[in-house]
Image (cartoon, rainbow, N blue to C red):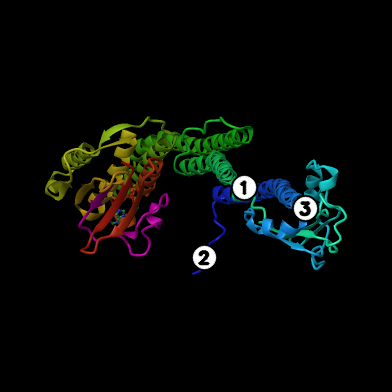
Amino acid sequence: MRLRLWPRSLAARTAILLLAGLVAAQAAGLGIEAIGRAGLQRLEQGRHLALRVMELYITVAKTPPAQRATALRELRLPAGITAQLDSEPPARMLVSPLPVQQLVRLNMALVPLPPALRPAEVVLLGSPAQEQMMIGLRLPDDPTQPDDPTLTRRQWLNVTAVLPAPRPWQDPDLLAAFLLMSAVAAALTGWAVVRLSAPVATLTAAADRLGEDVNAAPLPEVGPSEVTAAAAAFNRMAARLRRFVQDRTLLLAAIGHDLRTPITRLRLRAEFVADDELRAKMLADLDDLEALVTATLAFGRTATSREPAAPLDLAVLARTLLDEAADARPELAERLVYDGPEHLTVRARSTALKRALGNLVANAIAYGGSARIRLLPPEVAGAPVRIEIEDDGPGLPPGETEQLFDPFRRGEESRSRETGGVGLGLTIARDILRAHGGEVTLANRGEGGARASVRLPA
Ligand SMILES: Nc1ncnc2c1ncn2[C@@H]1O[C@H](COP(=O)(O)OP(=O)(O)OP(=O)(O)O)[C@@H](O)[C@H]1O
Ligand SMILES: [Mg+2]
C-alpha cells in the first residue's frame, strides 16, 4: 500500500504548506541569530584568552630569566592553556592571521604595561578551524641586569590555547523561545485553516440539503466577503431552483384541477349512454382519469407544501395508519400488525410523513393483502430510526425495484388490476422522506412478500 503523504483535504494541504513556510522562516531566523551569537562568543573568547595570556606573560616577564622555567612550572594555568619557554617563536605550521588572532592581539595591546616589560615581539598563529591558537611572546631580557653576558639566547613564552568551537545552539533560552514561537504559530495556523475551510463544509452541507428539499432554509450570508458572496450566489441559485420546481408543480396542479370539471361533465353525459356495456366502460375510464387527476394534485401539494417540522410520535402514527386501513378493509384487520415500541418521537412534518408512510402501507395492502409495520428505534445515538413495512404478497417484480419509484411507474400486475393506482405513490413517499433527510428502498423478503425499508433521522 502506498503511503499517502499528500492529504486530500484542503484544510490539511493549506496547513502543511503554511507550516512548511513557517519552519523555513524559523530556520532562517534561527540561523541568522546563531551566526550573531557565534560572533559574540568568539569575541568573548578572544578577550578572555588575551587577558589570561597577558597575566601569564607579566608573571613570567617579571621573573629573572634563570628562574623563569621553574616559575612557569609552578604556575597554575587556566584550562585549555599550556605554556612553555622556548628559544624560538611558535613553528609556522599554522596559518595566520585570522580574525580571532587579531582580536586577541588587539586585546593584549589594551593591557597597560611599563615599557621595560613590553614584549619585544609577538607572534600569533591559529589553525584553520580556529580551534587551536599559538601565541609567542618574546620575553624581555633580565630587567635587573640588562647586559648579562650569560644571556646569549632569547627567551620566548609560547602559549598554546585550545578554543572550543562556539555553540550558539546550546542556549536553553534560544531553544525555549524557538519552541514557543513555533507552537504559537502552529496553533494560529491550525485555527486559521480550520476557520477558513469551515465555509466549504457549510456549503457542501447546504448543497446536500437543497438536493433533498428545495425548501431548505437559506445559507446565512455572514463572514468574510468571499464567503458572503458564495453564500449569496448559492441562495440565488436555490431560489431559482425553487421557483422552477414550483412553476412545474403549479402547472401540473393547474392542469389536474382544470381537468376535473370536464371529467365531471363527461360523467354526467355518460349516464345518458343507452348501451349498458359502453356506459360501464366509459364510467370506469372516467374513474381512472379522476384518480389520476387526484393523485397529480396530491403530488403537487407535497412538492409545494411548507408545513413546519414538529415533534411527531411515529408509534402513534403507525397504529393510526393501520386502524384507518382496518376501518376501510375490515376483512384484513387480522393481517394488519404493528410491531414496535409504545412511543417514538421524531421531528417531522406530520401531514407529509403520514402521506409517505400511508402510501407504503396502501401498497402493502393493495399488492400484498397484508401489512406489518415494524418500528426500530436507533441502536446508537445519532443513528436513524428504521421503519419496515412488510407484506406477504407475491413480492416485487425482480430487478426493477428502483424504477418503481419513478413517477407514473406501475408494475404489470397493478396495470391489469382494476384497483391499480396511478403510479405516484412511491414517488411521493420518496420525495417526502428525502425532504426529511431520510430514504426509502424496496426489496423482496427472503420468505416471500415485499418490504419497504424507511430510514428517518431520529
Ligand atoms: N408491496 C408491494 N408488493 C408488490 N408490488 C408493489 C408493492 N409496492 C409497490 N409495488 C409495485 O410498484 C408499483 C408502483 O407503486 P406506486 O405506489 O408508486 O404506484 P401505484 O400503487 O401503482 O399507484 P398509486 O400508489 O399512485 O395509487 C405498483 O404499481 C406495484 O406494481
Ligand atoms: Mg401505491
Q: Which residue is mark 3?
A: 100
Front in this rendered view, residue 309 or 394: 309
Any magenta on residue 392?
Answer: yes
Observer-nearest of 427 and 415: 427
- Residue 171: x percent and y percent? 59, 47
Instruction: Specify whether 324 is left or right of 297.
Output: left
Dot 3 alpha-carbon crowd within 10 angstroms: few under 14, some 14 to 19, many 20 or more: many
The CA distance from mark 1 to mark 3 is 41 Å
Crowding around mark 2 (Cα neighbors within 10 Å: few <14, some 14 to 19, many 20+) is few
Task: For residue 156, say whether it is visible.
Answer: yes
User: Which quadrant of the structure image shows residue 403?
Assistant: bottom left
| Label whose residue precedes the other's in the sequence (2 or 1) | 2
Give the alpha-carbon distance from disc 3 to disc 2, as whole Å.
51 Å
**Label disc, if present, on residue 18 of the rendered structure:** 1
From which residue to which does the magenta span run? 386-413
Residue 3: numbered disc? 2
